[in-house]
Image (cartoon, helix red, strand yellow):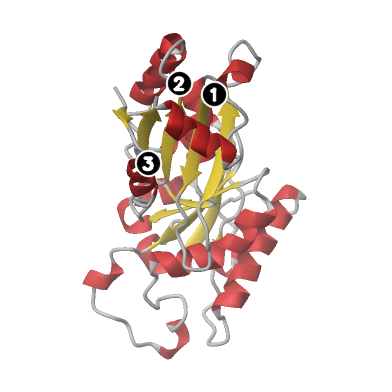
Amino acid sequence: STKELATIQETEDELSKCADNIDSIVIGFFRSDGYDDELEEYQEAAMSSLHVSRIQFHHVKNSTVVTYYQKQSWFLYPPAVVVQTCSKTTSEKENVRTSISLDDYYGSDKLPLQSWIQSVSLPLVGELLPSNYPTYEARGLPMLIGFFNLSQQNQKKRSTPDSITPNKKWSKERILRVMGRAAKKYKEKIMVVFTNGALYEDRMRSLGIFEGIDSLPAFAMNIMGDGNPVVPLYLSKRKKNNDDRISFQISNYCTNFLQGRLPLWNSNNTRKKSTS
């Protein structure tokens, strides 16, 4: 079952726990009487989401607490579910909240409640993990995957002058920043994620990235179907290739993909040809 929050202060304390390892905090708002069936369904949705460890579930039954948040315009009326996604960068000043009233949701032609919660819990730019891959896949959208060598901090730094920018340490803050332009521009058309390419070289090869971790960072489109992937995007090894330029390259790559201007990968598409 989900944790009950009995007071406004307790609710605020839980909401303040948004952190880098949490994608969202979910709270079901119910009154003390008359909503047992809805609460049970909500808790079943929470149980169905246990594999997505980055979502935390709670519920409220205290009428005073429910009324307080209703007056704060968090939801129209109970029973309701509120999903607060946790901001991942210092540039995102506030966490984002999304809500539904369950009376309007049940019986409608919409996703199951757990699918809706998992979908709106996805951050603008998320870290792709085995635990959340099914959630991304279920959305049915093309997925831009940024492959970074996140294990590089344990490796000896390279000092070749032509690889200063691509091989500079990639913090998650920096990754979110450079991929954020494309994520915001194509929010309803492409899912934007990143992952540790050092752990997924087989996956990279299936998407046309055959040079392993030496080619990272690299970006590829993951689309449904068994055909050849489109050519991946590699970062140019130029000193002037700063984060603004990288962000533009990623966004432009997405634009070309949506416009059908990216060729399919084949053995003749070398890294040199596909580098922007």
In the rendered image, residue 224, in percent from the top left (x then y), is placed at 57, 34
Please state which amino acid type lies under the numbered disc 1: Pro
Q: Categorize mark 1 by other alpha carbons within 10 Å: few (<14), some (14-19), many (20+).
A: some
Above or below, 258 relative to 6: below
Quadrant of the rendering where the C terminus is positioned: bottom right
Label 3 with label 1: CB-CB less than 8 Å: no
Q: Please, what secondary structure does the residue beneath circle 2 have?
A: loop
Q: Residue 31 carries which label?
A: 2
The residue labelled by disc 3 is 11
Q: Please, what secondary structure does the residue beneath circle 3 have?
A: helix
Gap in angstroms between the C-alphas marked 3 and 1: 16 Å
Farthest residue, direction front: 64
| Residue appearing at x 44%, y 31% in the figure | 64
| Residue appearing at x 61%, y 38% in the figure | 141
Label 1 with label 2: CB-CB less than 8 Å: yes
Q: Categorize mark 2 by other alpha carbons within 10 Å: few (<14), some (14-19), many (20+).
A: some
Quadrant of the rendering where the N terminus is positioned: top left
The residue labelled by disc 1 is 78
Q: Please, what secondary structure does the residue beneath circle 1 have?
A: loop
Please state which amino acid type lies under the numbered disc 3: Thr
Please state which amino acid type lies under the numbered disc 2: Arg
The numbered mark, 3 or 1, whose residue comes first in the sequence reads 3
